[in-house]
Image (cartoon, rainbow, N blue to C red):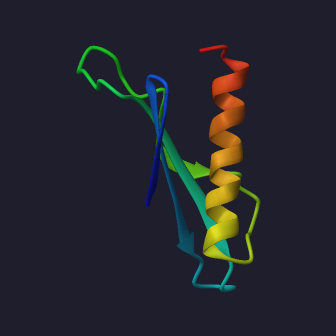
Amino acid sequence: MQVEVLGRYRLELSAMQLIHNGGWAAYAAIRTVEENQAQPSLLPYQQVADEAVFESEAAAIAGARRVAMALLKSGNR
């Protein structure tokens, strides 16, 4: 898992290899740096880019990062 801190947000990015075709799926979570029970995650840990199959673990993590960054940008957080 790759963790990046951007301001007050923590991106948790990872990849999982698919059994049926050997490709890779992208996963991400977006949490606040100061996690507290009253404020849930902005994006709970889940598969992102659902239909995408990446050729490598690094490519899947990069894809997860693009999705997370787009979500942060679209929300003007």
Q: Which residue is located at x 70 percent, y 23 percent?
A: 73
Q: Quadrant of residue 52?
A: bottom right
Q: Which residue is located at x 69 percent, y 85 percent?
A: 21
Quadrant location, the N terminus: bottom left
Horizontal side, residue 57 vs residue 43: left or right: right
Horizontal side, residue 18 vs residue 41: left or right: right
Horizontal side, residue 7 vs residue 22: left or right: left
Where's residue 54, x and y in %? 73, 70
Image: 60 above or below 56: above
Where's residue 65, x and y in %? 64, 47
Image: 30 above or below 28: above
- What residue occupies the far left of the structure in this picture? 37
Q: Quadrant of residue 72?
A: top right
Q: Which residue is located at x 76 percent, y 58 percent?
A: 51
Q: Which residue is located at x 57 percent, y 84 percent?
A: 19
Q: Quadrant of residue 27?
A: bottom right
Image: 43 above or below 2: above
Number of numbered discs present?
Answer: 0
Quadrant location, the C terminus: top right
